[in-house]
Amino acid sequence: MSVVHYQLRIADLSSRMLAVTLRFTPQQAQHQLALPAWIPGSYMIRNFARHITQIRAYDVSGELSVEQLDKQSWQLSCRAQPVTVEYQVYANDLSVRAAYLDDEVAVLNPACLCLAVSGLTELAQQFALGDTCEYTKRVTENWRIATALPRLTGEPLSRYGTFQAADYQQLIDSPLIAGVFSLSEFQLDGVPHYVVVTGNNLFDEARLLEDVSKLCQAQRDVFGTLPEDLNQYWFLLLVTESGYGGLEHQFSTLLLCNRQDLPVPALAEQDEAYQTLLGLFSHEYFHTWWVKRLKPACFHPYQLDKEQYSRQLWIYEGFTSYFDDLALVKAGLISQTQYLKSLEKLITRVTRNPSEQIQSLTDSSFTAWTKFYLQDENAVNSIVSYYAKGALVALLLDAELQQHGNSLAELCRALYQQYLQTGTADESIFTLLNSWQLTALATDLKHWVNQAKPLPLAKHLSTLGVQLDWRSPQQFDDLCGTSNKTETASLGCSLKY
Ligand SMILES: [Zn+2]
């Protein structure tokens, strides 16, 4: 057997337990089995393996020794015959990066379900959902499966059949959603794009499809063409009572939203919740080029057993955060006034916090593992967001490039073409600006991202014809310009209980 095969079953629906059976033919006397410590795109040690229980291994001759080595790996002693490893995984993390199971949906990220077999990660990896007991079989009778993982056997969308990834990296970059969902499709440049929305929701499906399709065109226009290898794309939207987030993958994205974020039928104009949801679609789709294909050189290849540090997250998340809302206005989905309103909020969010003058964007990128992703009550004082301030840097850069007859979109295209194979080094963006004879701008950009200082927003916005006026907060939570409350005094601190 020249593949690694994972079969997943629902072991117990009420206790949210999944059972995994892993089969492979050993190529050496010992193999290590390990789960990633983190999932690309989410820069935090997740310790997925803590949810594994009851691991055992055997072959036709009997039990095999499986010894745990550390928090995420096991040593397996093998004989020269096919091995079966069985274990259970607790699936109760309703997020875009882990595993979740209830009687309506299963969210399956192979990164937290499929133990990698050392030495065999370059082999084809098969994934199948197996038969369950009579009860779960009945509960899941109407379930279908949506994923970008290529299907080897079975009907499209069927909950039965086998999927096959070219290697372990592709496997863990391909989340699956099993359950009841609606599915709609549009084509962009001949490439099918699917929009999957979990549950039975009353919403304007045609409108969502049309709006997402316009957003994708706007993002495609930034780069000129779709990525060469993109042959399909899946938006997998998990609808919940409360939650928000997204995680990018090479051929898909897993998104999480509130039921209220979906467009109700006959919605006259974008409400704020739907606008935010469209921004999320837009953000994750931009990542298809920007971090899923072009990425920092230090992520070539990903090393998922421990932290992998980059000083460039301000480029990859900041620029993405700039282009996500920009695509909304370019696609005609929001007005210029609505766009300026969201820009106002962004500027207020960045400039109201003392952290802007405490931490630089490159430092915020580098320490994402222990700071940005592990925020506590001191975060507002100490951590600058490489998303939010990174988006403002992108705005200034775009304004300045346009003064020189270029644009940020052109800069992104040039970086994409030049560094797709190798990845970008910390200096690449400055090198490119210098090669365009924009040395002063390269120097300014270095200051903006390496120094913990306010950005010269007013100066550069004025070149776009936008005037920036500052005013004091007039009400208690007026800090983001959205308050209707009437409190007149502020302690100047955030309280949570
Ligand atoms: Zn992002």
Image (cartoon, grey):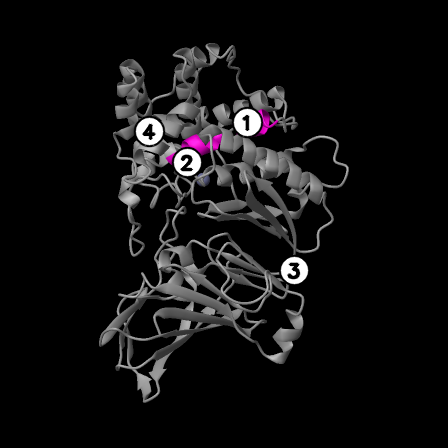
Based on the picture, tell me whether residue 34 belongs to the magenta stretch: no
Q: Respond yes or no on whether mark 2 lies under 8 Å from ligand 1.
A: yes
Q: Nearer the viewer, residue 369 or 196?
A: 196
Q: Nearer the viewer, residue 149 or 1?
A: 1
Relative to residue 469, is residue 136 drawn left or right? right
* Residue type highlighted by circle 1: Cys
Q: CA distance from mark 1 to mark 3?
A: 38 Å
Q: CA distance from mark 4 to mark 2?
A: 20 Å
Q: Which mark, residue 180? A: 3
Q: Residues within 10 Å of mark 1 (few under 14, many from 20)?
A: some
Nearer the observer: mark 4 or 2; the answer is 2
* Residue type highlighted by circle 3: Val
Q: Respond yes or no on whether mark 3 lies under 8 Å from ligand 1.
A: no
Q: Picture coordinates of residue 29 (x, y %)?
A: 22, 77
Q: Which residue is mark 4?
A: 358
Q: Respond yes or no on whether mark 4 lies under 8 Å from ligand 1.
A: no
Q: CA distance from mark 4 to mark 3?
A: 47 Å
Q: Which residue is mark 1?
A: 480
Quarter for ligand 1?
A: top left
* Residue type highlighted by circle 2: Glu
Q: Earlier in the sequence, mark 4 or mark 1?
A: 4
Point out the residue furthest to the left here. 29
* Residue type highlighted by circle 4: Ile
Q: Quadrant of the N terminus?
A: bottom left
- Say if mark 1 contacts mark 3, CB within 8 Å: no
Q: Residues within 10 Å of mark 4 (few under 14, many from 20)?
A: some
Q: CA distance from mark 1 to mark 2?
A: 21 Å
- Say if mark 2 contacts mark 3, CB within 8 Å: no
Q: Residues within 10 Å of mark 2 (few under 14, many from 20)?
A: many
Which image quadrant is residue 156 in?
bottom right
Q: Which residues are magenta?
A: 316-331
Q: Earlier in the sequence, mark 2 or mark 3?
A: 3
